[in-house]
Structure formats: structure tokens, C-alpha cells
Amino acid sequence: GQQLNQSPQSMFIQEGEDVSMNCTSSSIFNTWLWYKQDPGEGPVLLIALYKAGELTSNGRLTAQFGITRKDSFLNISASIPSDVGIYFCAGHTRETSGSRLTFGEGTQLTVNP
Amino acid sequence: GAVVSQHPSWVICKSGTSVKIECRSLDFQATTMFWYRQFPKQSLMLMATSNEGSKATYEQGVEKDKFLINHASLTLSTLTVTSAHPEDSSFYICSAPGDGTSGSREQYFGPGTRLTVT
């Protein structure tokens, strides 16, 4: 099946630093999504990317859909303590049976005040 | 974005009993919903796709007789874990496509249900 390789697995940074994480795949996706999950809660959609090469921002977050359609990155600028959580990338494919998401393994972000 | 709710948020049950988890789309109708399970420090694993008016589609390795899915209406899908065992203890999360149909590319997630089987 399809797999997404997400890196790094975890990051420990100081408040104010910038963060970058990425996902790569051997398969092509037609949409890339980035989610954040806080402990004990469901994932919350941060950014959705629909076109190869697309660069999209949401506040301090910026994400790009790789030109090959097999990768995506997420940058967080000037991190703050509430950025702590697990960040997941997800690739979307449309099959005859409907749509499905494939998730990366997640990046655990810790921000030290 | 679309709002999805789940009930209960957590449940503890005895081994051998059945537990029902509800997933509702609050401000939109969804002909398709998805059920995931997540173990500690792991990613989300798709269990099944719930389809209103037809049978659910289960992922390989997921027992359809153990995890019963009923898409009762355009705003409600239920997951029943039958004859629960301790290894079924997990975080169960549902999601719904942004426009409520299987063709939508974004999915919005519920807050999750923590199931503990003793």
C-alpha cells in the first residue's frame, strides 16, 4: 500500500525558533494535507494543498506541495509554546471506491519557553 | 471548516461487552464518514469507510463482524465494538469529508473516543 515517510519523528526547540518538517512518498498524491493533533483530541486541519508547486500560508504556517507530487513540507515560523503537539501530513487519493487519506507517522513538536 | 462530534469522549467497559460510538456531522450532511483507530504514539489507521444507505467498506485486516458500522442518517454514523477485548483498547476517531461526499479531498475529524476494555 501507499506509505508516507514523515521526518523528523520529534523536535525539541526553543520558543521563537523556526521549524521545518516534511513528508515524502513513492506514490503520487493529488492533495496534501497537514494536521495538528493535541493530546486526547482529534486532528485539526491546518493547511490543504491542491496543486503541484503550490505554496500556501496560514498565519505562521507555510506549506508547499512538491512539484513531483510526491512530497510536501510544513514550516512554522517564530514558534510559541502552544505549537506543541503532533503534526501529521496526509496524502489524498481518489479511488473508484471513494477518497482516502494516507497519513505520515507524525512529528512530535516540543517548544521550550 | 466542518464540525464533527463524537460521543462518548471516553468509555470503560468490561471484556466481552459491546460498545457503541457515535459520530455526527453537526452543520452539514455527510454521505460518507471514515473511522480510524490510533494507538499511543502512533499514526491514524483507517478502519473503514461508512456509506449512508449501503454497507461499509472495511480495510484489509479489519473484522467487519467485530466492528459494526451503521450509517443511520446523513448526519450520523455509529461504530459498535462487539465482544470487546483488552486489545481493542484504543483511541477511535471519525472524520467526514468537507463537502460530505466521498469525492471531497479534505477530511474533518471528531474529537475522538478513548475506549478502555478491562
Image (cartoon, grey):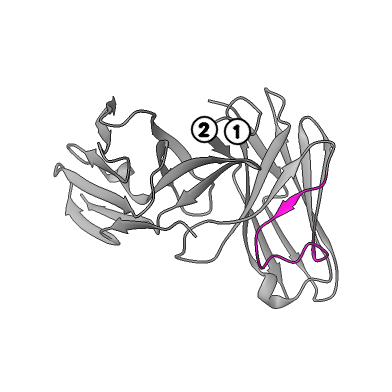
Asked if marks 1 and 2 touch (Cβ < 8 Å), the reply is yes
The kind of residue on which mark 1 rests is Pro
Which region is colored magenta?
B55-67
- Residue placed furthest toward the front: A96
Q: In the picture provided, is A65 more to the left or to the right than B100?
A: left
| Up-down relation of residue B31 to residue B6 (above or below) | above
- For the residues labelled 1 and 2, the Cα–Cα distance comes to 7 Å
> Residue A24 colored magenta?
no
- In the foreground, B108 or B97: B97
Q: Is B47 on the left or on the right of B14, as rendered?
A: left
Identify the residue position indicated by label 1 in the image: B97
Reading the chain from its start, which is encountered first: label 1 or label 2? 1
Q: Amino acid at mark 2?
A: Arg
Q: Which chain hosts label 2?
A: B
**Quadrant position of residue A65:** top left
Residue B58 sits inside the magenta stretch: yes
Marks 1 and 2 on same chain: yes
Q: Nearer the viewer, mark 1 or mark 2?
A: 2
Of A79 and B84, the residue lying toward us: B84
Q: Secondary structure at mark 2?
A: loop
Look at mark 2 in the image and give the residue it sits on.
B105
Would you say A21 lies left or right of B69 here?
A: left
Q: Tell me which chain the residue with mark 1 is part of.
A: B
